[in-house]
Image (cartoon, helix red, strand yellow):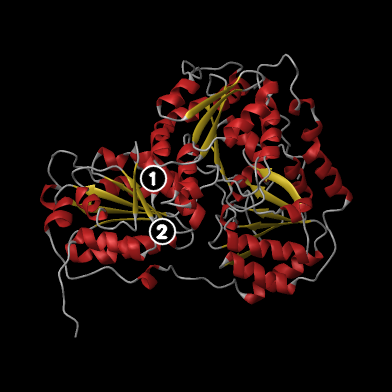
């Protein structure tokens, strides 16, 4: 019989992180969580990245989770340290990003007292997490940390938060050690019931215009491989939500009819209206409300996901296939007959022409006297210069609508947006995550990561330029600068005929970047864009590019809404 040894709870936490496969932890220290930070000093196999704000630490952890499928870890102290995590954790939980948040708390004996930094953080976080737990006894630490990881990593993925009281972490000992690595692997799901898969195969084969609508939970690499296999055998038109970007490869690009979200005015929306069978795969209504695209509630829908659907008047699937998305797709593919292109029909050809028409507009070519850059000129230029394997992180705002509609991504989870909570400020922290993931300890091995934001969104998290420079990241961040909260502005203009509370300005972004040790660039004239963009992308390190953007035609983003008569 092996000898029972005592150990510190903080050591149990950190060893649990090691056994869970955690390579990096992001956070800000404080007195209520310093025992955990102290223990991390003795575990060089985990890289500790100190951020400039707890919210950004959680954003970075969420991107780690999204990019790897393994929960990212953020750490904060009690009180305001914990509340600063909330926005980022809400974003992660809504958008299916696995995160484990470890939060300090006051000693147990003080938990009911009015004392410094005392706050019931788990009660605050409960509505925006899959699960929250407080360690009440030192012998619970191993169990609770294990459960937090398994909960966050199990589908649908999301956030687990754990409160670690100061007295347990700093003065107690326990004989319950961390669980082995195999315990941290979440349960695996099988395919949906065979009879339902057979029904769906029959429905697809007999449909005149079946369409795949891929959602956020269809965008992991393994599921994408299953999607590709299905489409190669039985090609049908494909649409993506914004967070499903990259599901369709260059080889299958002829089947791709765009990304949908926010406003029902895209060629893909017309394709769905003409379809006699829409197969939603990993679709979440937070990305694109069914009331927006199934306006009469009469479209024929099959729901394929890891979780049951949110059944409403506007979303009433004829079939629900619940189980591993990839396994279900593989079984479906085996039952579908091989066939020729569906996407070559007259309907599809006309919609495809409409979808690609923007590439031939005058917007993509600057005039000699233009000082501002049209968004489509920017996107077409970036598309030419960027490599397919470059991770592009896009903030929320007008920039995210343009990029989500018009920027093509061919690899899963290489174009990242926040399309559930639409949280401002995510781009730069996410880019830091994407950069560090390439090699946590060897900066020379990291390839370029691109992030974009408006001037408003950038200021939400711009202090993390300091973190990016300190960690030797290779990031180029583009700012679409118009001196306003433009996404708010054009919607206010459409609703009220005027704007209110949207003015910004007053920042020299080149000098701002340089003050953090980054390189600053500015596009003075539209015809300089490609040259400046090339220099910035060629710069090894952190750079910021100030791009004066022409939003003169931004009303087109929400114009020409397709009415109820088209359904």
Q: Position of residue 392 (x, y in %)?
A: 57, 42
The label shown at residue 130 is none
Q: Position of residue 196 (x, y in %)?
A: 65, 71
Q: Badge 1 is on which residue?
A: 58
Q: Position of residue 567 (x, y in %)?
A: 75, 45
Residue closer to the observer: 115 or 409? 409
Residue closer to the observer: 52 or 550? 52
* Residue visible at 76% across and 26% down in the picture: 365
For the residue labelled by badge 1, is the local secondary structure a helix, a strand or a loop?
helix
Q: Is residue 540 above or below residue 244?
A: above
- Residue extending farthest top: 369
Q: How many marks?
A: 2
* Residue visible at 40% across and 42% down in the picture: 471
Give the mark toward the camera: 2 or 1: 1
Q: Is residue 56 above or below residue 129?
A: above
Residue closer to the observer: 453 or 539? 539
Q: Tell me: 376 left or right of 144.
A: right
- Residue extending farthest bottom: 1
Inter-mark Cα distance, 2 to 1: 14 Å
User: How many residues crowd around disc 2 within 10 Å: few (fewer than 14), some, or many (20 or more)?
Assistant: many
Q: Tell me: 254 left or right of 149.
A: right
Viewport quadrant of the N terminus? bottom left
Residue 264 picture quarter = top right
Looking at the image, can residue 10 be seen?
Answer: yes
Q: Badge 2 is on which residue?
A: 152
| Mark closest to the chain's N terminus, 2 or 1 | 1
- Residue extending farthest right: 346
Q: Position of residue 296 (x, y in %)?
A: 70, 45
Looking at the image, can residue 304 be seen?
Answer: no
């Amino acid at each position: 019989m092996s000898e029972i040894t005592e150990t510190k709870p903080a050591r149990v936490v950190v060893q649990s992180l090691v056994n869970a496969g955690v390579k990096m932890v992001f956070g800000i220290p404080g007195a209520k969580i310093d025992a955990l930070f102290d223990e991390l000093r003795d575990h060089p196999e985990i890289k500790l990245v100190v951020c400039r704000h707890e919210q950004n630490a959680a954003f970075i952890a969420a991107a780690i989770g999204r990019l790897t499928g393994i929960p990212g870890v953020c750490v904060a102290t009690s009180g305001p340290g914990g509340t600063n995590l909330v926005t980022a954790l809400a974003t992660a939980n809504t958008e299916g990003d696995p995160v484990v948040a470890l939060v300090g708390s006051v000693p147990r004996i003080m938990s009911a007292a009015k004392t410094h930094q005392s706050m019931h953080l788990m009660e605050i976080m409960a509505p925006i997490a899959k699960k929250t737990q407080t360690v009440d006894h030192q012998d619970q630490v191993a169990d609770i940390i294990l459960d937090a990881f398994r909960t966050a990593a199990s589908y649908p993925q999301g956030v687990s938060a754990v409160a670690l009281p100061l007295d347990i972490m700093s003065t107690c000992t326990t004989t319950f050690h961390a669980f082995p690595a195999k315990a941290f692997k979440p349960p695996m799901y099988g395919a949906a019931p065979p009879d339902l898969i057979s029904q769906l195969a029959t429905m697809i084969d007999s449909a005149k215009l079946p369409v795949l609508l891929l959602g956020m939970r269809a965008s992991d690499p393994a599921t994408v491989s299953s999607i590709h296999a299905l489409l190669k055998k039985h090609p049908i038109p494909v649409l993506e939500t914004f967070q499903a970007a990259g599901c369709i490869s260059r080889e299958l690009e002829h089947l791709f009819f765009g990304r949908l979200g926010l406003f029902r005015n895209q060629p893909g929306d017309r394709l769905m209206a003409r379809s006699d069978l829409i197969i939603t795969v990993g679709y979440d209504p937070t990305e694109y409300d069914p009331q927006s695209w199934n306006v009469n509630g009469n479209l024929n829908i099959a729901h394929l996901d890891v979780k049951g659907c949110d059944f409403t008047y506007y979303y009433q699937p004829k079939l629900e296939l619940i189980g591993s998305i990839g396994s279900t797709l593989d079984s479906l593919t085996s039952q579908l007959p091989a066939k020729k292109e569906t996407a070559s029909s007259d309907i599809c050809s006309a919609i495809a022409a409409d979808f690609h028409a923007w590439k031939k507009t005058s917007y993509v070519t600057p005039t000699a006297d233009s000082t501002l850059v049209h968004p489509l000129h920017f996107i077409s230029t970036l598309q030419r210069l960027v490599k397919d394997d470059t991770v592009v992180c896009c903030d929320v705002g007008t920039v995210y609508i343009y990029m989500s509609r018009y920027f093509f991504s061919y690899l899963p989870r290489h174009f990242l947006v926040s399309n559930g909570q639409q949280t401002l400020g995510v781009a730069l922290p996410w880019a830091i995550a994407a950069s560090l993931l390439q090699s946590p300890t060897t900066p020379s091995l990291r390839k370029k990561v691109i992030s974009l934001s408006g001037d408003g969104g950038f200021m939400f998290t711009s202090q993390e330029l300091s973190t990016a420079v300190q960690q030797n990241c290779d990031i180029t961040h583009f700012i679409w600068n118009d001196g306003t909260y433009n996404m708010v502005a054009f919607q206010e203009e459409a609703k009220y005929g005027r704007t209110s509370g949207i003015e910004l300005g007053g920042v020299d972004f080149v000098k701002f970047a340089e003050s953090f040790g980054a390189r600053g660039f500015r596009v003075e004239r539209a015809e300089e864009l490609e040259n400046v963009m090339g220099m910035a992308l060629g710069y090894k390190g952190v750079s910021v590019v100030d791009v004066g953007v022409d939003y003169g035609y931004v009303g087109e983003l929400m114009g020409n809404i397709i009415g109820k008569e088209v359904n």
